[in-house]
Amino acid sequence: MEIQKMKILGKIFVLLFFIHQNLSAQNNKKPNIIFIMTDDHSSIVPKQNDIKNQSRPFGFNGETKVHTPIIDDLAKNGMIFTRAYVSSSVCSPSRYTVLTGRYAGRSEGKVFLKQHPIGSMTRVENNVELELDRENLPRLLQKAGYKTGFVGKSHIIEHDLINQRKNWVKNGFKEYDKDADPNDKSVSEAMAYNHQKWTEIIKKYGFDYANAIYPANLKELHNDSINVHNVEWKNKAALDFIDKNKNSPFYLYYSETIPHGPAPWIKKEGKYVYGLHANPKFTGQGLKDITYSYLPTRDQILEEVKNLNKDVAHAWLRWFDHAVGAIVKKLKDEGIYENTLIVIASDHGDYNGGKTTLYEGGIKIPLMMHWPNGIKPNQTYDELVQNIDYVPTFLDLAGVDIKKKSKSLDLDGVSLKNVLDGEKKPVHEHLFFELGFARGIMTKDWKYISVRYDNQSLKKIEKGIEFIGWKGEKLKYPYYVRNAHLGNFASTNNPLYFDADQLYNLADDPRETQNIFIENKEKSAELKKLLIKYLKSFSNRPYGEFIN
């Protein structure tokens, strides 16, 4: 009996030894990094008189009508950033910044430079692309020994291809009709062929792995049937990447399509046709009959949220929450959870028409970071941070000398490593923003927004020539961006949108309802001076009377 006890104790000792060795190894090696991003998702909780049918944020943002227990638990046992922002409030430029650490106005992408040759004013919007010949985050992480993966929405390369279907065939892509049925084998095969081509293109930008790719928004697949969200398909690809690279440090860029339109809460004939009631076999790869038995069914998710008396229209958040949970479980099963940094953020907001503006509804985002080996539980950081900070932070954690790399990268952000260690001091005294014809500067309590036009627009304004808005409306001034639908929504829901100079006291007026630029000359001059400092860092890029 004693011998048997000794054998059991011996096995326990060996097991504990290996667990200790594994944890020690995790503590000493470079952390894995999983960056998970929602799309068009604000951190601001909607109020009763706000625009109807807009996205709700996560529970950790203070929203009580949603059920996101997995994400909220990660946030609670990590760090919540209460003043997180993006520098541009639309998809492509924000994603560019996430992957480069540069302001989007520094892009040298072919479409961007064609529209805005050096020497002319830039109009940052969905025209910004990653460059094949410039350093970026995944390339530098590859050099640091990381495996890199890309899952989900792109919208940061080949805009001529995604926006112009006529360019498909000459670039080797296969066509199908907009109303083609993915159940048709030939249609599905064409979609799968195109998907494979997109994965190969994305890999050229520094990724070892690419799967479950959407070249842009769902509509850029140009097919009515697959213009639906599929959380499971992307999640399976993310798990596959982890499984393939669990034995080396890795970086995963995991970009969701929800809640970008078609909004998952849209209901037709009693069904959430673009979300939880869509066909789970319809993917960006065509018809895929995949088993997702590790996740609850979509009906079970809806029933769960309903039984908890939460907002069922936003059960899509629990859908996404379960996908995050699958990632956490996989990390734990592989013994790499403790040394993995999980970041959950959004590309920008869309609260009360804030998308394509520099208002809080467009630039303020949800952000949390969770890393058992590196972040103590129950942490909040209430100072300003921005998406320019992700790249220097991740490189710093990966052991890359960012001081040496900052010149070749043109890094605009700072590392948050000390913040993750518990430092509460501000890393930014002010932030810079750019979007279309607008530029902005913000301190913790004040924001200044300027709206200036390029020479072509100014000539029309001076001659009294009206601009054509969404659905033919006549406008005295053009929208900030070329997309008239977005411009109309933003300007209609933000009455001060066209004001040339805007100053807001965020401490007293967080909803930015009162432009106090004229009566606060000293503060206006102070912030204008700060803005000029940022504008001067953009070589040969004029902007109104600020930089000629």
Image (cartoon, rainbow, N blue to C red):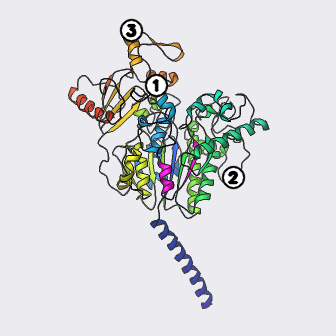
**Whole-number angstrom distance, CA of label 1 to CA of label 3:** 21 Å
Mark 1: which secondary structure?
A: loop
Which quadrant, please, contains the N terminus?
Answer: bottom right
Local crowd size for mark 1, using a 10 Å CA cut-off: few (<14), some (14–19), many (≥20): many
User: Residue 508, labelled with which disc?
Assistant: none
Mark 2: which secondary structure?
A: loop
Amino acid residing under circle 3: Lys
Horizontal side, residue 112 vs residue 385: left or right: right
Q: Position of residue 342 (x, y in %)?
A: 49, 53
Horizontal side, residue 173 vs residue 184: left or right: left
Horizontal side, residue 292 vs residue 360: left or right: right
Q: Which residue is mark 1?
A: 481
Hey, which residue is sitting farthest top in the picture? 464
Nearest to N terminus: mark 1 or mark 2: 2
Hey, which residue is sitting farthest left in the picture? 522
In the displayed structure, 133 sits above or below 14; it is above
Q: Which residue lies at the image location 37% right of the left edge and 47% below the top edge?
A: 407
Q: Is residue 421 magenta?
A: no
User: Residue 293, labelled with which disc?
Assistant: 2
Q: Quadrant of residue 216?
A: top right
Amino acid residing under circle 2: Ser
Q: Which residue lies at the image location 54% right of the left edge and 75% below the top edge?
A: 18
Which quadrant, please, contains the C terminus?
Answer: top left
Local crowd size for mark 2, using a 10 Å CA cut-off: few (<14), some (14–19), many (≥20): few
Residue 231 in view: no
Q: Position of residue 90 (x, y in %)?
A: 48, 33
Nearest to N terminus: mark 2 or mark 3: 2
The span picked out in magenta is 137-155
Q: Which residue is mark 3?
A: 463
Q: Which residue lies at the image location 61% right of the left edge and 28% below the top edge?
A: 164
Hey, which residue is sitting farthest bottom in the picture? 2
